[in-house]
């Protein structure tokens, strides 16, 4: 009965009812979309971290200046193979470790060419990165010792040089001016935590990269996998101690190397995402507040317009709480209908963002429940004052109202 009367009252002026719900629709849609963006970004970060490997500690050479310009992290020549060997020997808690150097080179096969990243690494790299082989095999310790001209291709490189789903094992490619034999192709890995396409790379022994392609003796980085997640921080501190000792860095002096863990990178990116989500959700909250004020305003107008009706109902026996409940129900109906349409619009907005900007979005059931609950609370909160005002009307005065 109460709901039938509420729908009838709201249906008397459909345009006003629709415009009243508009603020609630916009607010709820914005909240759903913002939560979906934040959740999608969080899951994207977690996926990128998982794809990078487990329990990682990254060590980078420092920077240096040339002609007044800083060359960036990894550009210095202060990391050596002796440093890496000292870390292997002295640091407890290391499961796998790989030194690394990196360069960009053109790769040529017959009339086809492709410029990509050449990563010189060690044999434990696939275990560190949890990165299996799709075709062929990975290079061996002997290949590293002999500086063999062998290469394992990322899937993007293999597809561009040899075609989709082809197995180029045994083929000869030319990296720069040097011929290399393809001995394997990695499975697809996707984007790294930094956003780089990990499949667009070629993996070769670091000794080969040093001698044949770069002409250097130093290394640029080390990638370490701790034996367990609990030991990541300890391994990081132990590595720092070894390097500071070897590089004669005194307490208070700046390190000439950089250490990072995926947990730190994930925490930083997650915090940034959380801040942006909170900011955008705050803006969406303002829309909900405006929608709630609109409901209060229209309900006050409705009380004024229906004063004689309220007086008549009370004169024939309706109690104040009946009138209070009637107007509260109308406010809640407005809010819930607006919230329901807003949720549908939020779904649509999230899909548009994913389709147009390829930005990941995830709509969780919790956000839908939260949106419905917030809609109902908004209706009760902003409808309570008009409902109370209606319930306190004097029946005699209400019947005299013109």
Image (cartoon, rainbow, N blue to C red):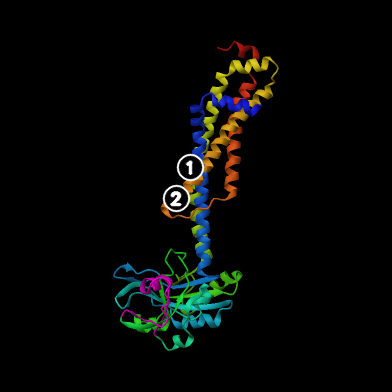
Which numbered tag is attached to residue 6? none
C-alpha distance separating marks 1 and 2: 18 Å
Q: Residues within 10 Å of mark 1 (few under 14, many from 20)?
A: some
Q: Residue under circle 1? A: 283
For the point 33% across and 83% down, which residue is it? 178
Residue 316 placement (x, y as % from top left) = 69, 15
Q: Is residue 228 magenta?
A: no
Q: Which residues are magenta?
A: 149-176
Q: Nearer the viewer, residue 250 or 73?
A: 73
Residue 189 placement (x, y as % from top left) = 47, 69
User: In the picture, residue 64 is in which quadrant?
Assistant: bottom left
User: What element does badge 2 sit on?
Assistant: helix
State left or right for residue 57 relative to residue 325: left
Q: Is residue 158 magenta?
A: yes
| Residue 241 visible in the current orientation | no
| Residue 209 visible in the current orientation | yes
For the point 48% across and 74% down, which residue is it? 250
User: In the picture, residue 74 is in which quadrant?
Assistant: bottom left
Picture quarter with the C terminus: top right
Q: Residue under circle 2? A: 353
Query: What residue occupies the far top of the structure in this picture?
Result: 400
Picture quarter with the N terminus: top right
Front disc: 1 or 2: 2
Q: In terms of sequence position, does the residue under pointer 1 or pointer 2 come before the other?
A: 1
Q: Nearer the viewer, residue 336 or 304?
A: 336
Q: Answer above or below: position of 313 versus 105.
A: above
Q: Give the mark count.
A: 2
Q: Are marks 1 and 2 in contact (CB under 8 Å)?
A: no
State left or right for residue 353 relative to residue 325: left
């Amino acid at each position: 009965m109460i709901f039938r009367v509420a729908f009838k009252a709201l249906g008397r002026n459909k345009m006003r009812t629709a415009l009243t719900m508009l603020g609630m629709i916009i607010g709820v849609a914005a909240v759903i979309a913002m939560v979906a963006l934040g959740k999608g970004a969080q899951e994207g970060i977690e996926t990128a971290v998982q794809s990078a490997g487990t329990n990682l500690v990254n060590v980078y050479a420092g920077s240096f200046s040339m002609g007044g310009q800083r060359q960036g992290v990894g550009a210095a020549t202060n990391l050596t193979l002796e440093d890496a060997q000292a870390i292997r020997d002295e640091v407890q808690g290391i499961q796998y470790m790989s030194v690394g150097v990196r360069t960009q080179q053109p790769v040529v096969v017959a009339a086809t060419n492709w410029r990509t990243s050449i990563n010189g690494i060690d044999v434990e790299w696939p275990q560190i990165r949890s990165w299996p082989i799709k075709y062929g095999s990975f290079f061996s310790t002997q290949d590293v010792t002999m500086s063999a001209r062998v290469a394992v291709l990322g899937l993007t490189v293999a597809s561009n040089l040899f075609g989709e789903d082809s197995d180029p094992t045994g083929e000869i490619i030319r990296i720069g001016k040097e011929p290399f034999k393809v001995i394997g192709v990695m499975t697809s890995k996707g984007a790294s935590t930094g956003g780089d396409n990990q499949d667009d790379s070629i993996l070769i022994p670091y000794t080969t990269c040093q001698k044949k392609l770069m002409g250097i003796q130093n290394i640029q980085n080390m990638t370490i996998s701790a034996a367990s997640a609990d030991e990541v921080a300890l391994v990081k501190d132990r590595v720092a101690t070894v390097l500071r000792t070897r590089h004669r860095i005194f307490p208070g002096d700046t390190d000439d190397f950089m250490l990072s863990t995926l947990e730190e990178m994930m925490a930083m990116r997650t915090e940034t995402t959380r801040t942006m989500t909170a900011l955008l959700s705050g803006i969406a909250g303002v829309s909900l507040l405006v929608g709630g004020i609109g409901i209060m305003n229209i309900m006050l107008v409705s009380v004024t317009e229906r004063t004689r009706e309220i007086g008549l109902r009370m004169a024939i026996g309706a109690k104040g709480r009946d009138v209070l409940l009637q107007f509260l129900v109308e406010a809640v109906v407005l809010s819930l209908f607006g919230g329901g349409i807003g949720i549908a619009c939020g779904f649509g907005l999230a899909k548009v963002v994913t389709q147009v900007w390829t930005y990941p979005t995830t709509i969780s059931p919790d956000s839908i429940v939260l949106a419905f609950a917030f809609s109902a609370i908004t209706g009760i909160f902003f409808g309570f004052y008009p409902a109370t005002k209606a319930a306190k009307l004097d029946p005699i005065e209400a019947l005299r109202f013109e």
